[in-house]
Image: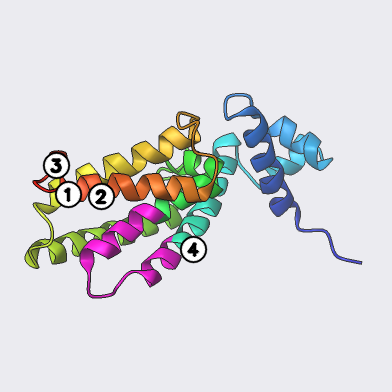
C-alpha cells in the first residue's frame, strides 16, 4: 500500500486547491487544516502563518517556472540572443497558463518577497543577471535596441498577456496553442514595430 505524503506536502496541496476554488482573500489556515483532517495547531507546526504557507506555495511555483524556462531556452538557438530572450517570454506565458495560482503568488509582493524567501531571492538575482546578459549581447550584435527599453517593453507585454489570461480577459483563448499563437503575434509586433513597412 502506498504511503501517504508527508503532512507538509498535503497542506500545500490542499492550500493550492482552496486558493484555486476560493481565491486568496477567502483562504485561511483553518480551512487548510479541515481539508487535511488535522487540527489548526498541526498546520502551525509547519508554517508560522498564512503568509508563510503561501510563500512556500510561491517557492513551489518557482520550481515549476524554472522547468518551463529550461524547456523553452533549450529550444532556442544558443547563438541567437533575440530568440533566447523570446523563449523567456514564452516560458512565462506557458507557466501562467498551466499554473495560474502559482503565477499570481509569484507576482504578489506579499508572498514572493525576496526577504521572505532565500530561494526566491537567489533565483530572482540569477534570472536578472541572465536576462541582462542576453540583452547586452543582443545590443552588441545589433539585434536589439537599448537593453533597458527593450526589457521594459517586452516584460510589460509578457506580464500583461499573462495577467489578462489569468484574470479572464482573453475569453477567446481556451488552449495553450491559442495562447502561444497570440504571444507569437504580439512578439512579432513588438519586434517589427507598430507601423507596417512598405510591402507588408
- Is residue 198 in the magenta section? no
Question: Which span of residues is magenta-colored?
Answer: 69-90
Residue denoted by label 2: 188
Circle 3/circle 4 CB separation < 8 Å:
no
Q: Please identify, in this view, whether the residue under mark 1 or under mark 3 is nearer the observer.
A: 3
Q: Which mark is residue 196?
A: 3
- What main secondary structure does the magenta stretch of the protein show? helix
Task: Please report whichever mark, 2 or 4, sits nearer to the chain's N-terminal start.
Answer: 4
Circle 1/circle 2 CB separation < 8 Å:
yes
Task: Please report whichever mark, 1 or 4, sits nearer to the chain's N-terminal start.
Answer: 4
Q: Would you place residue 178 above or below residue 66 in this image?
A: above
Residue denoted by label 1: 192
- Rounded to the nearest angstrom, the CA distance separating label 2 from label 4 is 25 Å
Task: Please report whichever mark, 3 or 4, sits nearer to the chain's N-terminal start.
Answer: 4
- Rounded to the nearest angstrom, the CA distance separating label 2 from label 3 is 11 Å
Residue denoted by label 4: 67
Amino acid at each position: 500500500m502506498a504511503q501517504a505524503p508527508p503532512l507538509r506536502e498535503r497542506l500545500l496541496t490542499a492550500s493550492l486547491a482552496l486558493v484555486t476554488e476560493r481565491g486568496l482573500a477567502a483562504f485561511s489556515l483553518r480551512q487548510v487544516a479541515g481539508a487535511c483532517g488535522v487540527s489548526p495547531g498541526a498546520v502551525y507546526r509547519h508554517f508560522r502563518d498564512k503568509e508563510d504557507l503561501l510563500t512556500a506555495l510561491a517557492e513551489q511555483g518557482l520550481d515549476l517556472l524554472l522547468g518551463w524556462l529550461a524547456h523553452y531556452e533549450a529550444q532556442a538557438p544558443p547563438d541567437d540572443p533575440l530568440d533566447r530572450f523570446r523563449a523567456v517570454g514564452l516560458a512565462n506565458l506557458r507557466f501562467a497558463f498551466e499554473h495560474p495560482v502559482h503565477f499570481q503568488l509569484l507576482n504578489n509582493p506579499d508572498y514572493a518577497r525576496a526577504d521572505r524567501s532565500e530561494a526566491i531571492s537567489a533565483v530572482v538575482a540569477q534570472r536578472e543577471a541572465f536576462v541582462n546578459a542576453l540583452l547586452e549581447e543582443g545590443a552588441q550584435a545589433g539585434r536589439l535596441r537599448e537593453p533597458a527599453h527593450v526589457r521594459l517593453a517586452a516584460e510589460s507585454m509578457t506580464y500583461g498577456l499573462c495577467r489578462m489570461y489569468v484574470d479572464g480577459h482573453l475569453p477567446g483563448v481556451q488552449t495553450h496553442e491559442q495562447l502561444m499563437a497570440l504571444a507569437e503575434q504580439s512578439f512579432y509586433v513588438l519586434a517589427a514595430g507598430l507601423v507596417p513597412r512598405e510591402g507588408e
